[in-house]
Image (cartoon, rainbow, N blue to C red):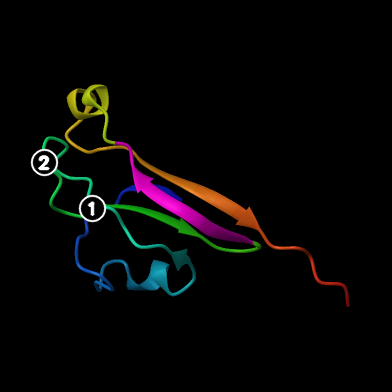
């Protein structure tokens, strides 16, 4: 799951139930787009995948398109374990 979760406090009560079941990566500053100061956007993953990279896309067009910079994430798949 990724998106604007509007929570800048790490481990905040509003996100805690979700964060207990997901891996999270360091969150880039993405708001406001013109001069990012806050980390409101998150990439969360669970299951066999792991986050390999999370970054904010800071191009001139991205800064004009929204009040948030787009946040991207790369996944690395873990090999299945045989029983």
The answer to whether the residue labelled 1 contacts the one labelled 2, judged by CB atoms less than 8 Å apart, is no
Say which of marks 1 and 2 sits in front. Answer: 2
Return the x and y of residue 6 as percentages of the image width and height.
Answer: 22, 53
Q: Residue at x 40, y 69 (%)?
A: 19
Return the x and y of residue 62 as percentages of the image width and height.
Answer: 26, 27
Image mark for residue 58: none
Query: Which element type, helix, strand or loop, lies under badge 2?
Result: loop
Q: Nearer the viewer, residue 57 or 31?
A: 57
Q: Nearer the viewer, residue 46 or 57?
A: 57
Q: Residue at x 12, y 51 (%)?
A: 37
Labels in figure, total: 2
Return the x and y of residue 34 as percentages of the image width and height.
Answer: 12, 35
Residue extending furthest toward the bottom:
83
Q: Is residue 51 left or right of residue 41?
A: right
Q: Residue at x 52, y 56 (%)?
A: 52
Q: Magenta region's main secondary structure?
A: strand
The residue that disc 1 covers is 40
Which quadrant holds residue 33? top left
In which quadrant of the rendered image does the C terminus lie? bottom right
Query: Which element type, helix, strand or loop, lies under badge 1?
Result: loop
> Which of the two discs, 1 and 2, labels the residue nearer the N terminus?
2
* Position of 33 relative to 19 (above/below): above
* Position of 58 relative to 40 (above/below): above
Magenta span of residues = 49-57
The residue that disc 2 covers is 35
Q: Is residue 52 magenta?
A: yes
Q: Residues within 10 Å of mark 1 (few under 14, many from 20)?
A: some
Q: Is residue 83 left or right of residue 6?
A: right
Q: Residues within 10 Å of mark 2 (few under 14, many from 20)?
A: some
Label 1 to label 2: alpha-carbon separation: 13 Å
Return the x and y of residue 64 as percentages of the image width and height.
Answer: 18, 23
Which quadrant holds residue 69? top left
């Amino acid at each position: 799951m990724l998106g604007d979760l509007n929570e800048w406090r790490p481990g905040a009560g509003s996100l805690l139930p979700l964060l207990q079941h997901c891996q999270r990566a360091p969150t880039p500053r993405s708001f406001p787009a013109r001069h990012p100061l806050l980390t409101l956007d998150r990439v969360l993953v669970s299951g066999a995948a792991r986050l390999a990279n999370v970054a904010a896309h800071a191009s001139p067009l991205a800064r004009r398109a929204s009040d948030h910079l787009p946040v991207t994430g790369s996944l690395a798949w873990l090999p299945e374990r045989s029983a």
